[in-house]
Image: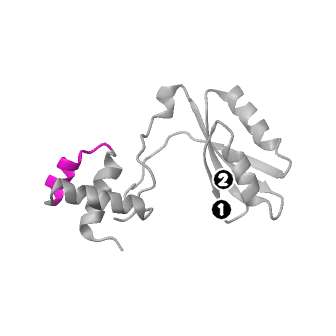
Amino acid sequence: MLDEVDKKILKMLMENSRTPYTRIAEKVGMSEPAIKKRIDKLVKEGVITSFSVNVDPWKLGKNLIALVFINASPGKHREVAEMISEIEEVVEVSIVTGQFDMMAKIVCENPKHFERTIKKIGSIPEVLKTESFVVIEQIEGNKFMGL
């Protein structure tokens, strides 16, 4: 169970994973070694799974972002999701409820690149159907997950 100090630490790291331990220590009123110990514990327990960098796909020349909803053969959802996740343009795959079995978020350079990517997904034998939605604008939500 996370206490309020752990939650404050997580919020700071989620805002900027490069926040120095000294700055975190100042903000939460603890020593730097105590902060390191808490962060190490959060990593060990799997609460923190990685320290990463978020990038703007448009600034990398990825001018087309799409959500692709996919139906797969019964009993093959996990297998298909894993195959789709290996496609270079796919940044995220989720198995979902509703009329589709999964959703993939893809980033492409242009419509032709998008078409090639959809063909890659469709070439997986267990993929039965895809339906795509091009993202017009992304609006960041609350990344703190209720902390």
**Element type at mark 2:** strand
Depth check: give the residue in front, 66 or 11: 11
What type of secondary structure mainly makes up the magenta span? helix
In the rendered image of this protein, does residue 44 appear above or below residue 17?
below
Would you name the residue on which mark 2 appears?
A: 103
Q: Relative to 138, does residue 56 appear above or below in the rendering? A: above
**Which residue is depicted at the point 69% across and 28% down?**
113
Residue 52's spot in the image, x, y percent? 42, 43
In which image quadrant can residue 40 be found? bottom left
For image coordinates 35% across by 51% down, the residue present is: 14
Q: Are marks 2 and 1 in contact (CB under 8 Å)?
A: yes
Q: CA distance from mark 2 to mark 1?
A: 7 Å
Nearer-the-camera pick, 133 or 120: 120
Q: Position of residue 109 (x, y in %)?
A: 61, 27
Q: Where residue 88 sits: x, y (%)? A: 65, 36
User: Which residue is denoted by mark 1 in the rendering?
Assistant: 96
Mark 2 is on which residue type? Met
Q: Residues within 10 Å of mark 1 (few under 14, many from 20)?
A: few
Q: Per the image, is 147 magenta? A: no
* Segment colored magenta: 18-28
Quarter assignment of residue 27: bottom left
| Extreme-bottom residue of the structure | 1
Q: Quadrant of the N terminus?
A: bottom left
25 falls in the magenta region: yes
Q: Earlier in the sequence, mark 2 or mark 1?
A: 1
Instruction: Say what secondary structure mark 1 lies in.
Output: loop
Colour mode? one colour
In the figure, 97 relative to 79: above or below? below
Q: Residue at x 77, y 56 (%)?
A: 71
* Residue 93 appears anywhere in the view: yes
Report the amino acid beneath label 1. Answer: Val
* Residue drawn at the location 54% of the way across and 25% of the way down: 61
